[in-house]
Amino acid sequence: MSNHALENAAQAIRQSRCTMSFTGAGISVESGIPPFRGPGGVWSKYDPGKFEKAYFKRHPKEVWPLLKKVFYDLLDDAEPNAAHYALAELEAAGKLAGVVTQNIDSLHQAAGSATVHEYHGSIRRMQCMSCRIFFDANAISLERLPPPCPACGGLLKPDFIFFGEGIPTDVHRAATDLAKQADVCLVVGTGGQVMPAGRIPYIVKNRGGTVIEINLHDSDYSYTLSDYYLQGKAGVRLPELVRAVLG
């Protein structure tokens, strides 16, 4: 996309009273984390039905090795990339009110972002399905699967949203409230296919706000919602945009 679009997008953020970012799997691909959808995605290799909450409760011994392989072994070594750091820099400069992310990797926090609403939960915590206590995932050994709850010996579940599971009311409200305040929504690395998360940029747009999109490929947002579409890698285009904003 042209420098003209980049400058217009930067100007929109400079003039905004409240800018938010809405991120998806595409922002973490450059950290070595594959997307879930599309060619080469997680769901092209694994049956999503195995990650349905009711199936997990019935077959934890079958599902937990998959959880370890697909999520913990893969995400444990992942580091934030330039796109994550660019959003943290924008927030530190007072130009970004917060991030709503569909990702469960917590790389935004690792990069230094302070206000992050994890719409689909986080791999960094687990919850016991019996006593309901939460635990830091780093404190739980995965030598034995399923790992037993340290408090009661019950079944631990990663604290991210499985299929068939609702979005927690508190995070949905926080994400929606931020969108209702925002003049600009910076969409990065998501095509808006997963609902209800994908509706969040529409809240900003429907209030007369501006939507800036950074994606490698055209998305459901590109021609119906986005005011400025900066095509390319998040780790390249987002730092370019932040430099243009901050000067």
Image: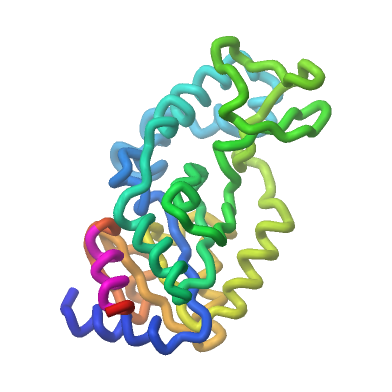
Residue 129, position in %: x, y? 76, 29
Q: Quadrant of the C terminus?
A: bottom left
State how the image is colored: rainbow
- Name the quadrant containing residue 43: top left
Of helix, strand and loop, which mostly describes the magenta segment?
helix
Q: Which residue is drawn at 54% across and 83% down?
A: 206
Name above or below for residue 21 compared with residue 84. Answer: below
- Name the quadrant containing residue 136: top right
Name above or below for residue 77 compared with residue 112. Answer: above
- Left or right side of 91 for 197: right
- Name the quadrant containing residue 217: bottom left
Residue 167, position in %: x, y? 67, 51
Residue 170, position in %: x, y? 72, 58
Q: Which residue is drawn at 57% across and 31% down?
A: 51
User: Which segment is the magenta one?
Assistant: 236-244
Name above or below for residue 153 compared with residue 23. Answer: above
